[in-house]
Image (cartoon, helix red, strand yellow):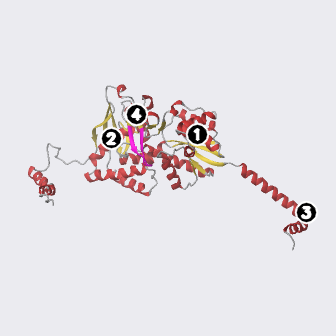
Amino acid sequence: MKTPDSLVHKAEHLLTDADRRALAGIEKTLAKAVKVRAEKKRLAVLAFSGGLDTSFCVPWLRERGWDVVTVLVDTGGFSREKVREIGRRAKELGAKKHFFVDGRREIFDRLISHCIRANGTYQQMYPVMCADRYLIVEKSWEFARRLGAEAVAHGCTGMGNDQVRFDVTLRALGCDNIQAPIRDFQAMGGGPVRERERKFLEERGFPVATKHTRYSINQNVFGVTISGSEIDERREPAEDAWTLTAALEKTPAKADRVTVGFEGGLPVSIGGKKFHGTEILRRLNEVAGKHGVGRFLYTGDCVIGIKGRIAFECPGLHTVLVAHRALEEAVLSKEQNQFKDTVGRKWTELAYNGLFYDPLARNLEVMLGEMQRHVTGAVTVKLHRGTALPVAYESSHELRQRGTLYAQTSSWSPDEATAFVKLFGMSTVMAARRPSPRKG
């Protein structure tokens, strides 16, 4: 029986010189392809802000065989100089390319608008300032598809809420390869992660701004959130932690009044002058912020089941929400006002919990839009010593009974009022007068 080697020898003997040259060419081509494939790095798109966390991600990914493209989505937190600085930082850290997206108007139109219509404050306190993450994820995924990237990366930790918002949204959009360098870094152990990130960067020659070692700061059109350092320790933040609001002892003695105009539940003007919502918030941040309005400390129930404490500032948005609620109270029916709180609360919970892409969020937005059709008018807000007080309003849609003024005059008779009160309270009176059942 012939061995395999003898068969191969016979086959080679039958080859012509042309066949041998062709095979040699194929072998060379295959060897070159294998070499190119071995040398080619994988491509990841990183949602990048230039802060400590996302700065850490660039060299971490590169050391693990990734080419990194960074994407900065400005949702209202950066000056022009800061945008340029972040671009330089990305290149300094080794990003292959860096892209910038101006998302300030889009974040208002697609997210903040719903927050205002919903009076969207999580646990009656926090105005879902985290919702800009959804736009950041969308834009990062768009670049990943455009560039043919294998993964999208983010700088979220394994302890916070943002990892849920990023991961769930990316998967909802169709991305299954998600890189989370800080979570991987945490899995290695070794103490507080932010201090280890700082050392990691400095050991590789990348300086870290001093403030980044104390706080994690996020700023967007909503306002500013601050965490870390003494805030995590349940202590009062140092005064230099605050960005948009003045300390009460430094606020003006004289109040300011601003009149915010609304159409369909959304702010459209200040003092009668029309502006886009983003500009309205920017202007109100300045005037309300100097009065110390919109400064908060908050301990919330996190998505992942723990308590999280943050400081946040939203002078413009807080002023708008105060004005918006005052107008709603006047123009919506009693049943609308009561039920709308339920609708708004559920939308806010979806946005906070990372479930913004659940179909229910779209359903609720349609309902909120319909309920806001008559929320048109103007509200004057008095800003003074940390408070925003809606002191006056006007609307052609106000639900007002002609000839009636609360506790003074009415369009019905005293006898009609007496009969109404008797019938309205009848069930309660009967139940209260019912004898208690005997025990035993």
- Give the distance between the C-alpha atoms of the residues marked 2 and 4, in whole angstroms: 28 Å
Find the distance from the CA under tag 3 to the CA under tag 1.
57 Å
Mark 2, residues whose alpha carbon is within 10 Å: few (<14), some, or many (≥20)? some
Residue 331 lies, in percent from the top left, at 28, 48
| The label number, if any, that marks residue 322 in the structure image | 2
Residue lying farthest to the left in this orientation: 415
Give residue 17's mark: 3
Which residue lies under the disc numbered 4? 235
| Residue depicted at x 56% and y 37% | 196
Whichever of labels 4 and 3 marks the residue nearer the N terminus, that label is 3
User: Given this view, does label 4 or label 3 mark the residue nearer the observer?
Assistant: 4
Task: Report the residue that reaches farthest toward the front.
Answer: 440
Classify mark 3: residues with Cα within 10 Å, few (<14), some (14-19) or many (20+). Answer: few
Mark drawn on residue 56: 1
Estimate the x, y position of residue 21 in percent, counting from the top left: 87, 60
What separation in Å lies between label 4 and label 3 (alpha carbons)? Answer: 84 Å
What amino acid does circle 4 point to? Answer: Arg
Of 233 and 99, the residue lying toward us: 233
| Foreground disc of the pair 2, 4 | 4
Amino acid type at image mark 2: Val
Q: Which is the main secondary structure of the residues drawn in magenta?
A: strand
Structural distance between the alpha carbons of marks 4 and 1: 28 Å
Kind of residue at badge 1:
Phe
Report if residue 298 lies within the magenta region. yes
Residue contact at pointers 3 and 2, CB within 8 angstroms: no
Please report whichever mark, 1 or 2, sits nearer to the chain's N-terminal start.
1
Q: Position of residue 177 (x, y in %)?
A: 58, 53
Query: Magenta residues?
Result: 297-310
Q: Earlier in the sequence, mark 2 or mark 4?
A: 4
